[in-house]
Image (cartoon, rainbow, N blue to C red):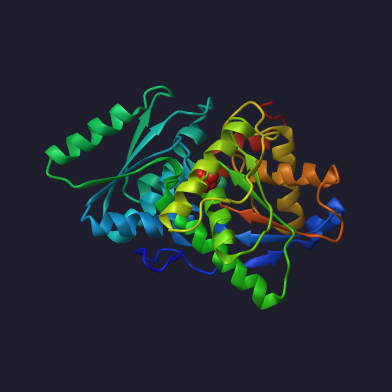
């Protein structure tokens, strides 16, 4: 299995820091906690999609694309990082953004990631929740081609096997950091959305021959649906790498933090965001990393992560969404 043969456009500040979170760990009274800071990948306020875009946009450039088209919810971090990367590379960017979350405050509609998408010069196309479809994408790409453009489409979250290579590389980066510090990690906790991050980490650890259990915390849907999504993308990513697919690593997804649905933070999520901010000066987001931290906190309180063990929380970014959720964060209430 080889990663070097895939073209990669440098976009991220790497390696991202690996830091202890001692005050949070002390408060929770369980394992030693470590944070992999992929909120610090640099480009356009950072996040996990920058790593995927290094491989996806290298492919777009190789195909001589001049316009990047992608999709995600209205407050998509993936859309914002794609807009920033397109600006950096001199590509046009068009964002098809369905209103997937039933929040319609002015902040949600206009601030956070949406504000940044527009600053990066992307064309933002808000859609009704049920308006997005494969046919709509085909129409959009067809229209661009008829205008003489050369579009490149990136599916939701950049979670294709090629995009997942960003997290294969990230897992190898982590393995090097652990070796440098002689640190052994007993478990990794990561949010699971469109699955490229989770699947890529599993493929990368398999590539390195390291068996660290990875616990995905679902941010939407059920644990079953997310496990299937991760499993399929993992198999496809291993195949792309030309590696063995017969004995793939185990997929664990915890569906208990989803609450009322995607983009809707529960009381446990708001507690996780506040606790981490106050004890570490570290920002989480209400959609992804807040749910993942709520899952980690619940797991520690339930005794699933042993005292004295080392648990790594993979911070995937999402900070700009905090500004879109101003109402939810300032009122003590939650949406559940
Ligand atoms: C997209 C995203 C995720 C989920 O990553 P996937 O690869 O889609 O599973 C997690 N956290 C943040 C902040 C994201 O923007």
Q: Residue furthest front?
A: 246
Q: Determine whether, in the image, residue 322 is placed left or right of residue 311.
A: left
Residue at figure coordinates x 50%, y 26% from the top left: 104
Q: Determine whether, in the image, residue 5 is placed left or right of residue 99.
A: left
Residue 10 vertical placement versus 258 (above, below) = below
Q: Quadrant of residue 309?
A: bottom right
Residue at figure coordinates x 56%, y 36% from the top left: 228
Q: Is residue 264 visible?
A: no
Q: Quadrant of residue 32?
A: bottom right
Residue at figure coordinates x 19%, y 35% from the top left: 142
Q: Nearer the viewer, residue 281 or 248?
A: 248
Where is residue 223 shown, x and y percent of the image? Answer: 64, 34
Residue 299 vertical placement versus 172 (above, below) = above
Where is residue 232 shown, x and y percent of the image? Answer: 50, 41
Where is residue 8 shown, x and y percent of the image? Answer: 37, 64
Number of numbered discs present? Answer: 0
Residue at figure coordinates x 71%, y 29% from the top left: 333
Residue 129 vertical placement versus 209 (above, below) = above
Q: Nearer the viewer, residue 115 or 270?
A: 270
Q: Locate the C terminus by quadrant.
A: top right
Residue 287 vertical placement versus 187 (above, below) = above
Where is residue 67 shown, x and y percent of the image? Answer: 25, 48
Q: Is residue 117 visible?
A: yes
């Amino acid at each position: 299995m080889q990663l070097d043969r895939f073209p990669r456009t440098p976009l991220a500040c790497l390696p991202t820091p690996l830091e202890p979170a001692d005050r949070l760990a002390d408060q929770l009274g369980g394992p030693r906690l470590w944070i992999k800071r992929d909120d610090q990948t640099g480009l356009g306020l950072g996040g996990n999609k920058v790593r995927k875009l290094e491989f996806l946009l290298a492919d777009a450039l190789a195909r001589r694309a001049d316009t990047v088209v992608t999709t995600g919810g209205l407050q998509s971090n993936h859309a914002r990082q794609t807009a920033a990367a397109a600006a950096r590379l001199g590509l046009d960017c068009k964002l098809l953004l369905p209103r997937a979350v039933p929040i319609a405050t002015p902040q949600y509609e206009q601030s956070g990631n949406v504000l940044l998408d527009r600053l990066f010069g992307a064309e933002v196309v808000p859609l009704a929740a049920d308006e997005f479809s494969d046919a709509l994408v085909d129409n959009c790409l067809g229209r661009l081609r008829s205008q003489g453009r050369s579009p490149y489409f990136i599916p939701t979250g950049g979670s294709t096997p090629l995009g997942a290579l960003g997290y294969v590389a990230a897992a190898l980066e982590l393995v090097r950091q652990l070796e440098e510090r002689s640190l052994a990690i007993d478990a990794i906790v990561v949010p699971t959305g469109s699955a490229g991050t989770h699947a890529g980490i599993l493929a990368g650890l398999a590539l390195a021959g390291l068996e660290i259990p990875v616990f995905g915390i679902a941010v939407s849907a059920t644990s079953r649906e997310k496990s299937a999504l991760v499993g399929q993308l993992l198999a496809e990513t291993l195949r792309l790498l030309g590696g063995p697919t017969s004995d793939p690593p185990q997929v664990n997804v915890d569906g208990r933090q989803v609450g009322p649905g995607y983009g809707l933070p529960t009381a446990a999520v708001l507690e996780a965001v506040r606790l981490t901010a106050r004890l570490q000066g570290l920002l989480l987001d209400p959609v992804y990393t807040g749910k993942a931290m709520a899952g980690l906190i619940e797991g520690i309180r339930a005794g699933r992560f042993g005292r004295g063990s080392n648990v790594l929380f993979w911070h995937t970014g999402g900070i700009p969404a905090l500004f879109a959720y101003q109402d939810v964060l300032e009122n003590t209430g939650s949406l559940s």
